[in-house]
Image (cartoon, grey):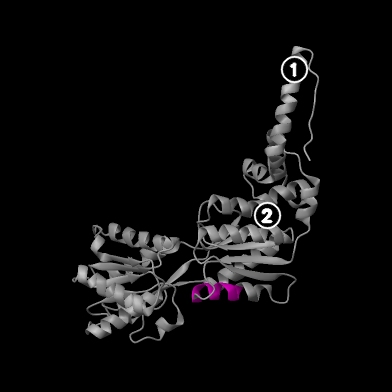
Amino acid sequence: MITYIIVKCETHDNAKNCRDMSNKVHKNKAVRLSDVAAEANVSVITASRAMRAPEMVTPETRARVAAAVSSLGYVPNPAAQALASARSRIIGVVIPSLTNQIFADLLSGVMDALEDGPYTPQFVNTRYQLSREEDLLRIFATQRPAGMIVSGIDQTETARELLRDMACPVVQVMETGSDPIDMIVGCNQRAAGRVAVTHLLDQGYHNIGFLGARMDPRAQRRLAGYHDALADHGIPADANRVQTTPQASSFTIGGQLLSDLLARAPDTDAVFCNNDDVALGALFECQRRGISVPHQMGISGFNDLDVVASSVPTITSVRTHRYETGRQAVRMILAALAGEDVPMRHIDAGFDLMARQSTARRGPAQGAT
């Protein structure tokens, strides 16, 4: 239904008031809660609380939200507020793969943290497709979730807006970032890649390559860390030493990537792999070729799956804390839902370099560093 407002303007002052009223009506129609949150520099759920339950936020936050409401001319929609308050017991979890061990570990943490509680996790798989992520978020929005856990920091602006408009606690996981939608917990992927390659350089390797499969944004940041470490040591970038493929990771792919790399840069003496499947494939290819690991070739993986600690030789890898990340994300959501202050909204979960036999060129491998 469209409501028309007709104001009779007979004087100059009345005409001005008429224009002001008309502008304000138009402005109110366009302003959303997410606009208020952005203006006040708070999350959407915080803006909502400041208006619905002001005792749950600090006086400073209430003042900022009130100023934003006044500045923007925001008028709450009672029907929308009633609908938003009817929350389901669903905690939505958006990840790019349901079969990848990395995300299986994250989901285990989420499920364990929600066990025996009133909330139920609901998982969806984006298959690394941004458009599919948007579609899935639209479905979640109709379910009025109690909270959302979303993998990564590379959502489209449409996806970010969908998450803000849900007006529920949102936690981005697996990475750190300077502009989270609401809350975030994960590790610095670029810094982790840098540490792994620095370790190879410290072990005396000089001609270090990079092997990467399915170069999603996390893998791209690990590659950036590879370049950072080389630059730190004054080593120029060499495109011949970077071998990637859009295909999914596997042992076979890892072996093929190393074979292709050695064809282009035969003097390569170490490789940093964007995950452990690729690292294991590189190890198998070395064994087929009679290349000694670690003496002729150093190998470092990423994620530290159980298998790399059991291979022969064992493989150096970067351990990321995926299970604990899942648990922490749930704890943050539950605290926000309970109206508690969440003092640490941006958490760097860190990582550990697990130095093993595959890079022990200068003596016995150490443990976590």
Task: Tell me where residue 148 appears, x and y as whole percent.
Answer: 64, 62
Q: How many neighbours does mark 2 have within 10 angstroms: few (below 14), some (14-19), or many (20 or more)?
A: many
In the image, what residue type sits under mark 2? Met
Q: In screen coordinates, is 165 left or right of 362?
A: right
Residue range (magenta): 101-109
Determine the residue positioned at 68% across, 38% down. Answer: 30
Which is more toward the observer, 85 or 172? 85
Alpha-carbon distance for marks 1 and 2? 39 Å
Please identify the quarter of the rendering in which residue 72 is found.
Answer: top right
Label 1 crowd bin: few (<14), some (14–19), many (20+), radius 10 Å? some
Determine the main secondary structure of the stretch shown in magenta.
helix
Quadrant for residue 32, please give it: top right
Is residue 296 visible in the rendered image? The answer is yes
Please name the residue shown 67% across and 66% down the image: 91
The residue that mark 2 highlights is 166
* Residue type at tag 1: Ala
